[in-house]
Image: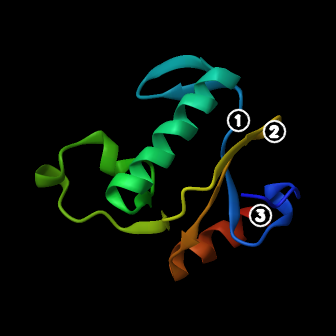
């Protein structure tokens, strides 16, 4: 994207991850700048190939096969290949569902 403003100042952008300690899938790990860059590249590829990335609650869609969990409610969708890494984390433009937007607004209060 040619916009030089920080994503936090652009409508619809959301920080998805930050560098530092992370507890995920039962283990402690550390996210580095290089990890965020790799995630950014994968997300861009996924949006181009699949047209969108589901943002669900608690990573449900990643934890078990779709056949096992059935339909997973979406909090939002990443449908734009603009994904950026900044010193304060990984940012993407998110199309929120009504419920997802409401949940994010509650979290910001």
Q: Position of residue 12 (x, y in %)?
A: 69, 70
For the residues bearing labels 2 and 1, Cβ distance under 8 angstroms: yes
Residue 15's x, y, as percent? 70, 51
Residue at figure coordinates x 86%, y 54% from the top left: 6
**Residue 95 point in image, percent of width and height:** 55, 72
Q: Residues within 10 Å of mark 2 (few under 14, many from 20)?
A: few
Q: Quadrant of the C terminus?
A: bottom right
**Viewer-closest of 83 and 12:** 83
For residue 18, which numbered disc appears in the image?
1
Q: Mark 1–mark 3 contact, CB under 8 Å?
A: no
Q: Residue furthest front?
A: 2
Mark 1 or mark 3: whose residue is earlier in sequence:
1
Name the image quarter holding residue 71. bottom left
Identify residue for label 2: 88
Q: In which quadrant is the N terminus drawn?
A: bottom right
Q: Which residue is mark 3?
A: 108
| Element at label 2 | loop
């Amino acid at each position: 994207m040619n916009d030089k403003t920080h994503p936090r100042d652009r409508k619809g952008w959301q920080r998805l991850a930050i560098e530092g300690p992370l507890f995920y899938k039962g283990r402690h790990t550390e996210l580095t700048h290089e990890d965020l860059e790799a995630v950014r590249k994968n997300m861009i590829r996924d949006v181009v190939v699949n047209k969108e990335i589901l943002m669900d609650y608690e990573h449900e869609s990643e934890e078990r096969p779709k056949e096992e969990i059935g339909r997973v409610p979406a909090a939002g969708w990443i449908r734009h290949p603009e994904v950026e890494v900044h010193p304060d984390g990984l940012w993407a433009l998110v199309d929120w569902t009504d419920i997802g937007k409401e949940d994010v607004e509650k979290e910001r209060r």
